Amino acid sequence: MEKLVNGLFRLRDQLLDEKVGCNSGCRSVLLGALIQAMHANSLYSPRPLKPCCIALPLLFLC
C-alpha cells in the first residue's frame, strides 16, 4: 500500500513539474482528478501515516 501512495504523490509531483501530460490543459485536468480522488480517500492532506489500510477505487487517467 505504501508503494501505491508513494506512486500517487510521485505522479502529483510529475504533473506539477510538467513532466507528464500532453499540454497544460491536460495536466490541469489530470492533476485535479488525482487530487480529488486522493482527497476522497483521505490520502491527500495530511499524507497518510504508515501503515495505511485504505481501499482505493480505480483511478482512470487519459
Image: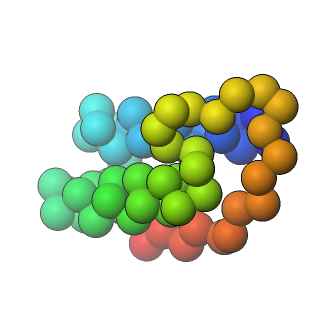
Position of residue 4 measured from the top left corner of the image (x, y, whole percent): 71, 43
Q: Quadrant of the N terminus?
A: top right
Q: Quadrant of residue 57?
A: bottom right
Instruction: Reply above or below: 24 against 45.
Output: below
Seen from this angle, which residue lies furthest top? Answer: 50
Q: Quadrant of the C terminus?
A: bottom left
Instruction: Reply above or below: 17 against 12.
Output: above
Q: Nearer the viewer, residue 10 or 54?
A: 54
Give the colour scheme of this rendering: rainbow
Number of numbered discs on residues: 0
Instruction: Reply above or below: 10 against 31.
Output: above
Q: Is residue 10 visible?
A: no
Instruction: Reply above or below: 14 against 31.
Output: above
Position of residue 31 measured from the top left corner of the image (x, y, whole percent): 34, 54
**Residue that appears at 58% across and 50% down:** 42
Position of residue 20 measured from the top left corner of the image (x, y, whole percent): 37, 47
**Residue that appears at 83% across and 46% down:** 53
Position of residue 16 measured from the top left corner of the image (x, y, whole percent): 29, 38
**Residue that appears at 39% across and 37% down:** 14
Q: Is residue 26 visible?
A: yes
**Residue that appears at 55% across and 72% down:** 60
Seen from this angle, which residue lies furthest left? Answer: 24
Q: Nearer the viewer, residue 16 or 45?
A: 45
Q: Is residue 6 left or right of residue 29?
A: right
